[in-house]
């Protein structure tokens, strides 16, 4: 079972998470920091958990109240910016960093790129490709939540917000719409709008299930992130089948660092990469 510690920039690591002593021989497992929060991060942790030469640690931002269980040690909370992450990399003798954060967690990716470059720690991004429109899709890309609010317009509509609870609060600025909100954690307090329903669920979601959800709530338009991957693509297939408009928040720019798309590619990279002090 993972050990969960709420950590800020100067937080201490519990003994259960400390792993091999830094004073032991260099033959001890290399410490690998996985910046998580995605299904890819969970799969990577599971893939590396049995590697005797590696000691993976997953870092979570702490935005989700009940994160999925991990088979490796876990730290929760921010690092305290670039300087805090640099200090962590040095103090914990991190041999390599895998950025497996969500495609929209651009700030963490920027901090990882800067900190790893400054400390000479190898960095690899595990990035999923964005969804691409196909025949029958009615997609419109916008810049962030303000762009989505503008795209919804002033005519009342039934809107499915598939954004997570951190972004939905902004839609209180358009209370004339009726909202269906799906999130991993409950939205507390509920939105200050006259009409809102809530679904608390964790993916993956199927096209059949999302088709039933959209029909049951008579949804007219979806607001979502272009997260990529299969886990939440069901709503896109359901929207296509129903001919619904989808307003997609454009992906933010992320640093240009070495990147792969699969867990196995990460595992292969870790076999060849050299630690900072190698």
Image (cartoon, helix red, strand yellow):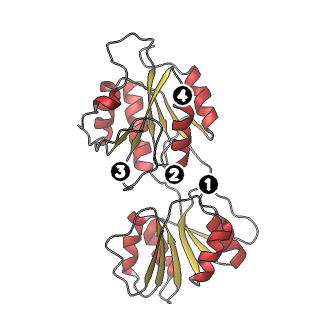
Q: Which residue is mark 4?
A: 50
Instruction: Find out whether the residues at labels 1 and 2 contact each other: C-beta distance under 8 Å.
Output: yes
Q: Quadrant of the N terminus?
A: top left
Which label was assigned to residue 69?
A: none
Residue 81 sits in quarter = top left
Q: Whole-percent x and y of residue 125?
A: 53, 38
Q: Position of residue 71 (x, y in %)?
A: 48, 38
Callout 4 crowding tier (Cα within 10 Å): few <14, some 14–19, many ≥20: few
Is 48 above or below relative to 227?
above
Q: CA distance from mark 4 to mark 2?
A: 27 Å
Q: CA distance from mark 3 to mark 1?
A: 24 Å
**Marks 3 and 2, Cα distance to the nearest angstrom?**
17 Å
The residue sitting at the top extreme is 25
Element at badge 4? Answer: loop
Q: Earlier in the sequence, mark 4 or mark 1?
A: 4
Image coords of residue 249 (percent x, y): 52, 64
Front disc: 3 or 4: 4
> Which structural element holds mark 1?
loop
Residue placed furthest toward the right? 135
């Amino acid at each position: 079972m993972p050990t969960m510690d709420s950590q800020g920039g100067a937080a201490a690591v519990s003994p259960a998470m400390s792993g091999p002593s830094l004073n032991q021989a260099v033959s001890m497992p290399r410490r690998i920091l996985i910046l998580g929060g995605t299904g890819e991060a969970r799969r990577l942790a599971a893939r590396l958990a049995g590697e005797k030469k590696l000691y993976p640690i997953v870092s979570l931002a702490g935005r989700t109240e009940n994160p999925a269980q991990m088979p490796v040690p876990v730290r929760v909370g921010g690092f305290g910016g670039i300087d805090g992450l640099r200090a962590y990399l040095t103090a914990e003798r991190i041999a390599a960093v895998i950025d497996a954060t969500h495609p929209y967690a651009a700030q963490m990716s920027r901090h990882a790129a800067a900190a790893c470059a400054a400390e000479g720690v190898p960095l690899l991004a595990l990035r999923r490709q964005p969804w691409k429109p196909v025949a029958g899709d009615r997609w419109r890309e916008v810049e962030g939540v303000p762009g989505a609010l503008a795209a919804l317009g002033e005519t009342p509509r039934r809107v499915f917000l598939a954004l997570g609870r951190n972004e939905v609060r902004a839609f209180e600025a358009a209370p004339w719409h009726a909202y269906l909100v799906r999130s991993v954690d409950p939205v507390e307090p509920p939105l200050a709008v006259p009409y809102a329903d809530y679904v608390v669920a964790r993916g993956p979601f199927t096209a059949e299930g999302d088709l039933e959800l959209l029909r049951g709530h008579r949804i007219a338009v979806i607001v979502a992130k272009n997260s990529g991957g299969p886990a939440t693509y069901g709503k896109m297939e359901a929207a296509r089948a129903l001919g619904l408009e989808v307003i997609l928040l454009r992906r933010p720019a992320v640093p240009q660092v070495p990147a792969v798309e699969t867990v196995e590619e990460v595992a292969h990279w870790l076999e060849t990469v050299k630690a900072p002090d190698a």
